[in-house]
Amino acid sequence: MSLRQDKKPALQTLRVLLGDDASGIVDLRQYPTDIRPVCSDDAHRQFSLPDLHGNVVLFVWILIKLGYVKLSKEKYDELVDLYLDHDPIVDLLKIFDVNASESDSSDAEIKQKSEAEIDEEFDALLTKYRASLEKFDNILESMEIVNLLLILALIGDETADRGRNDIFIARLIKKLIKSGLKIKIFFSNHGAEFLFAVKFKKLGLSQASLESTTETVQLPEDQFTRSLQNLGELVKLGLVDKDELTEFIDQFYIPNLYLIDAVRDKSKDESVTYFTHAPNIPTELEELHLKQLADYYQLPCDLQDRKSHPDVAKQINDKFREWLMTASEDDVLAVLKDDEHIINKTIWSRDIQLPLAKELERLFFNFGHHEVPPEITKENTNGTLVGTDGPTGKADLNKGVLAVSTTTFYSTPAGKIALFSTPVKDKASKPDAAESRRTKRMHNVLYKPAQPNFKE
């Protein structure tokens, strides 16, 4: 089976490799094989994805591989071609020669274009990107969500990153949520750029970031927020409505946004896994990130009462979402630019170490943002650190190792967690209408959107 656990399980959260061969390498240009079927224990399972780098092809590949959705190979290939041909800023530079590279052999020719020629190329560009968005919407329409029991956790960097356009990610997330899939979106450094730009009406500027106010078309030097820059261009061109993005932020993004999550194993040892975008590993119990966030929001947090930690995390997330809905631009900037602020540390920290103190036993940490160093990986024999960030999908559709984590929400003996459990009969094909209704009813009973954490 191609889904391979990286280490022997020490608890309910495991790092899993998604490669189709022994090397563990994934090729995003190729349709996934050996797709995970719907399983009998999926109502108790969550997959936490790696940093998505604003790459919708990476996102869709994983969704197909893990059995969340069905999409034909033909439509997947269309998505790959569409994605690789989608780069509005680069296309605009070719027309207007704004900040064009000195090495561009066509410089002289471009500068001699008549106004009529520029108008013609500009109209062609509008036609191209209007068709691109329509084609993407058609691909989404053909996508079928086939597993509403599994929980989907996005560990961060799903937007405002090196990918081609955030409108793709936004429309996909909206479709998944409207279909009834439970999604957790972890607040991240790149996600903060996206939220800030949309919420405070910065889109329409080519560089709608926390630092920039320029209105000229220019290629970002580091490409770290290319997907957001390209979205801004489509807004300026009138191809994406700001109201669509505001609706997405208010109705789909913020209501499902998490600063932190805590999942407790209900076995006697009371193990807990904490989820944040950036690694926040304590050296002593008082430094536990859950405690620091609870103190910031003036919430009680008993470090010894691990059973209460999921509820504490829920209260933290509720406070955070409430603040985001009402905070001013200056308030948000003050937090995001303060390196010592606990929210900032939640999305930016890169400090990875093993929690060695006795009082930290049976505490586990799932994060993205930064790869676990090889020397730490060698010492991480009990799976305490579950890091899923990696380079795959950062440079468009490059090949690479790809990992997710899988979490179960009920007690199972250590070492006995099945990655697949028992496939449900005939679930590899389209479930009938009655079964779809049963699955959706079960999902709504177990995981209501208003209750982002899991009660016993």
Image (spheres, helix red, strand yellow):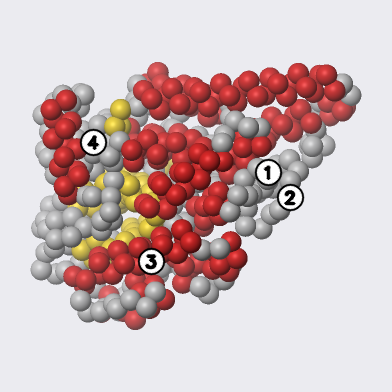
* Residue, disc 4: 147
Whole-percent x and y of residue 129?
Answer: 60, 26
Residue 435 location, quadrant: top left
**Between marks 3 and 2 in the image, the one whose residue lies nearer the viewer:** 3
Q: Residues under labels 2 and 1: Cα distance?
A: 7 Å
Q: Are marks 2 and 1 in contact (CB under 8 Å)?
A: yes
Q: Determine the CA span between mark 3 and mark 4.
A: 30 Å
Q: Secondary structure at mark 4?
A: loop
N-terminal of the pair, mark 2 or mark 1, is: 1
Name the amino acid type tagged 4.
Asn
- Vertical placement of residue 293 versus 412, above or below: below
Q: Earlier in the sequence, mark 1 or mark 4?
A: 4
Can see residue 226?
no
Q: CA distance from mark 3 to mark 1?
A: 32 Å
Q: Where 6 sits versus 219, above or below?
A: below
- Residue at horizontal 44 percent and vertical 36 percent from the top: 171
Dot 4 or dot 2, earlier in sequence: 4
Q: Which residue is the site of mark 3?
A: 319
Q: Are marks 3 and 2 in contact (CB under 8 Å)?
A: no
Q: Quadrant of residue 36?
A: top left
| Disc sitting over residue 206 in the figure | 1
Residue 83, given in percent of the width and then of the height, sits at 53, 29
Q: Which residue is mark 2?
A: 214
Q: Nearer the viewer, residue 111 or 328?
A: 328
Taking depth in this image into account, of 210 and 415 the one nearest to the observer is 210
Q: Measuring from the top left, give residue 121's x and y in whole percent.
A: 74, 21
How far is the residue under mark 3 from the one under mark 2?
A: 33 Å
